Every structure is written in C-alpha cells, then in structure tokens.
Image (spheres, helix red, strand yellow):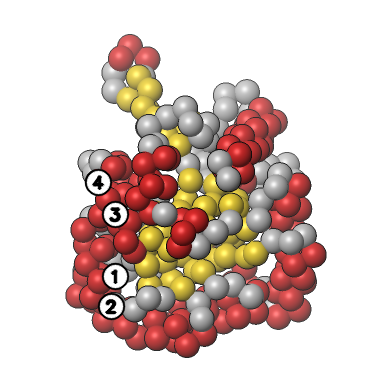
C-alpha cells in the first residue's frame, strides 16, 4: 500500500484559469516534495497524445523521484480501454481507473459486462488492474453486480464514497457494498453548508478530517494495508472569490494537509 496524489488535487492549477498551468512533470515534483509515493494521472486527456519518447520521459521522471504512476480515464469501450492499456505499458502502470459512462455512452449492466469481458482479459494478461469508480451516475449495487459478473481479479472498484451522495446513497452503505472489491481508494472529504438565507445547501469538499468522510470506517472495511490498496488524495475545492492566487494557495494547503494526515496514520 502507498499514499499518493491525483491530478484532481491540482484541478485549478492545471486549469485554463491558471496564468501558467502546471504540467505533469511539475505535479510529479510537487507530489514527491510533499511526501507522496504515487501519482495518479486521472482524466487528463492530453496524455493520450503523448508519443513514446514523451511517455518515456514522464516514466523516467517519476522513477527518478521515487514515484509509482497510475492512470485514470472514463468509459469502457474496449478500444478505449486498450488504448489506456498501451499507455499503461509505456508508463509502467499497473492500475487504471475508469467509469462506466461517458458523455456519449451509457451502457446498462448487461452491455457493461459484455464490453468488460472483452477488455479485462487483456488487462489481466498484462498484469494491469482496471478499477471502476463509484459515482452518482451509476447505482453502487449495479456497479458491484458488473464487477461480480465479470468475475476477474483484475477488475475491481475505485472507492470514492463522497461521489455517490448525489444519488442519495449513504457513504457508509457505499463502503460496505464495495469493500470486498476495492482496488484503489480516492481520499477526499466533503461537507454540506447552508446557502445564504438558509435556502438549500452547497455540497463541496473540505480539508480531510473536517467533513463527513468516515475515513477510519472506510479503512477498516477496505483494509488497504493488508490488501496492498493505494490511497490517492483528491479535492472538491470551490473556486475562491479572491481569484486564482488564493485558490491555488488553498489547493496546495489542502493537498499538503491531506497527504500529511495520511502519512501520519502509518
């Protein structure tokens, strides 16, 4: 088991709102400086355009910094998953995270099982695990049923219990249902705050340990140390009214706080 950081922890600093968006080598160096052991390149479409030389440079940079790389994408069409399997081979990656749906493809459970049965054996042959993330677009019970039907140890679940709240699923229930199948954990805390005038709520991220995430309960259920499951820091940090500098500064503070909290739990 290792602790790491995702591109989602650099959401605003790599965005178009940044005067000089961070590149992957910058994020790798920052992750290493903060004490992370893994870096997950998640939903970062530019990686798909990298040629072999650029991928090799990225892999070497990570190795020089003592970091393990992971990948993340969306969708389960076999051709797309095999593209990411090729990228995994070039980068030395053994864990790829994905989601069942994309903007133009929302398979039901029957189709999802059929598609994954095409791609997952190729992942297994390459020694790469595919993890499907919990999130609000797919019922957790359906996600679990897909993983159980494919029935391959190289297919599992990326646990992020905060995502499913928007589906009115309790985080504790998501953890309990998925625990036997978890292969990766996204660690981000979350909370509800009242809107002005008490008209509704805002559901957003907060510093780890200050919100509704039952981290200890999640870890007790998933047993990441025993099972070799990496824990990856993410955020839901809202844009700050003071602008980019304040947002970037707070994003860095949240990242540092999260990884330090995890490291202290060792």
Of 192 and 121, nearer the camera is: 121
Residue 90 in view of the camera: yes
Identify the mark nearer the N-term, 2 or 4.
Answer: 2
Name the secondary structure under disc 4. Answer: helix
Identify the mark nearer the N-term, 3 or 1.
Answer: 3
| Residue named by callout 4 | 173
| Residue named by callout 1 | 147
Residue 87 in view of the camera: no
Q: Position of residue 248 (x, y in %)?
A: 66, 35
Residue shown at 25% from the left, 41% from the top: 170
| Residue named by callout 3 | 137
Q: Position of residue 147 (x, y in %)?
A: 29, 70
| Residue named by callout 2 | 150
Residue shown at 50% from the left, 69% from the top: 96
Spatial CA distance of label 2 from label 3 is: 20 Å
Residue shown at 58% from the left, 45% from the top: 266
């Amino acid at each position: 088991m290792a602790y790491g950081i995702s591109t989602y922890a650099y959401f605003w600093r790599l965005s178009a709102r940044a005067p000089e968006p961070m590149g992957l080598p910058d994020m790798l160096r920052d992750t290493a400086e903060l004490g992370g052991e893994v870096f997950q390149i998640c939903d970062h479409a530019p990686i798909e355009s990298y040629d072999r030389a650029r991928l090799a440079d990225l892999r070497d940079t990570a190795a020089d910094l003592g970091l393990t790389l992971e990948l993340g994408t969306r969708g389960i069409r076999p051709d797309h998953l095999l593209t990411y399997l090729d990228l995994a081979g070039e980068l030395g990656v053994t864990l790829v995270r994905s989601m069942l749906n994309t903007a133009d493809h929302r398979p039901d459970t029957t189709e999802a099982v059929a598609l994954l049965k095409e791609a997952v054996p190729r992942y297994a042959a390459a020694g790469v695990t595919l993890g499907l993330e919990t999130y609000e677009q797919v019922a957790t019970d359906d996600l679990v049923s897909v993983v159980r039907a494919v029935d391959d140890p190289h297919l599992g679940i990326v646990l992020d219990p905060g995502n499913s709240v928007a589906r009115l699923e309790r985080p504790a229930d998501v953890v309990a249902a998925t625990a036997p199948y978890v292969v990766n954990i996204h660690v981000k805390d979350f909370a509800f705050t009242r809107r002005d005038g008490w008209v509704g709520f805002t559901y957003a991220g907060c510093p780890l340990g200050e919100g509704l995430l039952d981290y200890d309960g999640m870890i007790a259920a998933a047993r990441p140390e025993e099972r070799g499951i990496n824990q990856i820091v993410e955020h839901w940090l809202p844009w700050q009214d003071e602008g980019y500098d304040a947002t970037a500064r707070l994003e860095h503070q949240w990242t540092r706080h999260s990884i330090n909290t995890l490291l202290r739990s060792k």
